[in-house]
Amino acid sequence: MDVLRQLRGFYREKRHYLLLSILALAAATAVGLITPNLLRKLIDEVIVPLKFDEVPMLALSVLAVVIVKACLQFAHGFFGGRLGNYLAYRLRNACYEKLQFLSFRYYDTARTGDLMSRLTGDLEAIRNFIGFGFAQLLNVFFMVIFGSVMMFSINWQLTLVTLITMPFLAVVALRFESKIHPAFQEMRLALSSLTTAVQENVTGVRTVKSFAREAYEVEKFSHRNERYKDNQIFAAELWSRFFPMMELLASVSVAILLGVGGTLVIKEQMSLGELVAFFSLIWYIIGPVWGLGFHINNYTQSKASGERVLEVLNQPIDVRDKEHALDLDASRVKGEVVFDHVTFAYGNKMPAVKDIHFTAKPGAVIGFLGGTGSGKSTIIQLMMRAYDVNQGSIRLDGVDIREFKVRSLRAQIATVFQETFLFSSTIRNNIAYGMKQVDMDDIIRAAKLAKAHDFIMEMPEGYDTVVGERGMGLSGGQKQRIAIARALLKNPRILILDDATSAVDMETEHEIQSGFQEVMRGRTTLIIAHRISSLRHADQIIVMDEGRMVQSGTHAELIEVPGPYQDVYRIQYADYLARAGGRGEGPTHEA
Ligand SMILES: Nc1ncnc2c1ncn2[C@@H]1O[C@H](COP(=O)(O)OP(=O)(O)OP(=O)(O)O)[C@@H](O)[C@H]1O
Ligand SMILES: [Mg+2]
């Protein structure tokens, strides 16, 4: 019930709809009970005494009852629909907003498919239950209670004998539900694994083909397809057993009623009208009992769905603004970055970076070099406060970055990530992402600096060309250059480049480099690269290994001392060094 209480917060303003929908349905149930009474009247007081002139009146009354009942049912649907959709709308917005503000740590473990199903299927289950299911579950009890009371008032002995099968009916219905429910669950899983197979195959078709694994994929699919088919057959069999069983039990009730009731009528201990009324009342009870399992199940399922949705909404945000956090004033930021003996671990694992310490003067360029997994990306994630450090601190202009509002800190930083993400929109919108009112001239200037302008102009619609959700139709290097243009347009105080030119050729890289030199002037820049040519102009180069800083200095200093930097340098400049006949200051210009 705790779940339902929490959900109530999302429809509090419209809670009268819930009441109206329940009341309307209860009223419809009550009104429906007039019909058996009218039937009894028709038989006992009109047909049997042959009072023809009263027939039209009674027929019209039946019609009136039906019309009123229909109106009340409409009201139930109307208010239930309003309520359910209002709730779903509020929940959807709340979830989406929450997803925007959840920290990176949440997304490290979250699975896309799972989040999607929470936002669609689970929300739908909640909408249905709060809107309709809840009122209908209550109505089952109204029907059974109202119906039995009326039957008792006609003939209590007959009521007792006919209702004898009801507990059995209820047991069968609940048992069926307890079997069909897991079967459906299983079916849903089988279907989702089937769709996953299709989806992965479509997106990964190149990998499948290049490894010539078509036959394997076909077999994998047919395996899953078979599992789905078996599940379907199992569920169909359950259904096909359930209905005859229920029908049989219900018929026992009806047979008892006709046998005992018929005898009573012949003995004149009961009127014919009462028997007919009784006969229609019994269905008033059988129907809801059949549906009981369904409604209860609906309840448990939507409760589980509610828990899954609330889990997202109640997720704590670990990187958040302090109380009285400072607003970074863009015009005052100088850009001095200090890493003061920073240590950080993802989760409970070994620290990904240990004791990182360096000072970047305003406008300085700090380069990072190191093997894969050595902690380079982690350092820049910490800089933009994707995570908070475990030990030590990071300071911007002398102030711990945890003192600033997260938004205002990130507004000063532009990052080109290792993996480029482009939105499914035009190139222009992708470059201007997140900026209001940008001049086309500025976009073009940024694109030129990123060496993206030329290839953009060659695209069918230039800057208005739409690129797909993963930048379809663009090469890796082209995507990177758009991401660089995006970062440059932001005109940040701090620029972070994580392997930003890994996918472009040496020549283009060199051209982008010279573009960078221009925009990096006056900006503090953290640059990660695998090519020494990208780092050699940095004011300080930090060499990382297994999360630690193993070397630090300028290019000129580092090539002089034996160590990893010199090794990398020798490998990358082997040709040049061979031609120069030994070690030297290194090439001044590389292409
Ligand atoms: N989101 C994450 N959750 C858990 N562990 C992570 C996460 N990201 C990185 N790691 C781990 O932290 C360590 C450092 O990773 P990091 O991404 O900083 O390396 P890197 O130097 O950028 O490597 P590369 O050159 O391959 O990009 C690795 O051992 C990695 O497995
Ligand atoms: Mg990395």
Image: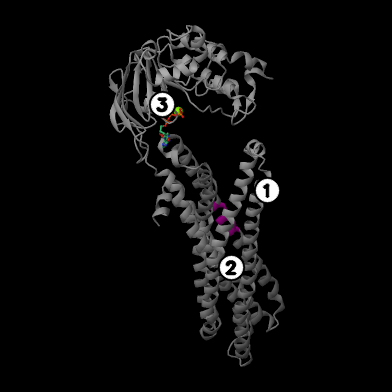
Is the C-beta of the residue carrying label 3 under 8 Å from the nearest atom of ligand 1? yes
Q: Is residue 49 magenta?
A: no
Say which amino acid is labelled 1: Val
Say which amino acid is labelled 3: Lys
Q: How many other residues sit within 10 Å of disc 1, few (<14), some (14-19) or many (≥20)?
A: few
Mark 3–mark 2 distance (CA, rounded to whole Å): 72 Å
Q: Quick one: 81 or 436, which is closer to the camera?
A: 436
Q: Residue at x 55, y 58 (%)?
A: 185
Q: Is residue 495 visible?
A: no
Mark 3 or mark 2: which comes first in sequence? 2
The quarter holding residue 466 reads: top right
Q: Quick one: 151 or 537, which is closer to the camera?
A: 537
Q: Secondary structure at mark 2?
A: helix
- On screen, 584 above or below 459? above
Indicate the position of residue 263 as horizontal and vertical percent values.
62, 90
Say which amino acid is labelled 2: Gly
- On screen, 567 above or below 110? above
Mark 1 or mark 3: which comes first in sequence? 1
Figure quadrant of the N terminus = bottom left
Q: Is residue 161 visible?
A: yes
Residue segment shown in magenta:
71-80
- Which of the two marks, 3 or 2, is nearer to us in this view? 3
Indicate the position of residue 48 as horizontal and vertical percent values.
68, 84
Mark linked to residue 32: 2
Mark 2 or mark 1: which comes first in sequence? 2
Q: In the rendered structure, are the residues bearing label 2 and label 1 in contact, judged by CB atoms less than 8 Å apart?
A: no
Indicate the position of residue 297 as horizontal and vertical percent values.
51, 62
Q: Is residue 74 magenta?
A: yes
Residue identifier under label 1 = 218
Q: How many other residues sit within 10 Å of disc 3, few (<14), some (14-19) or many (≥20)?
A: many
Mark 2–mark 1 distance (CA, rounded to whole Å): 56 Å
Residue identifier under label 3 = 376
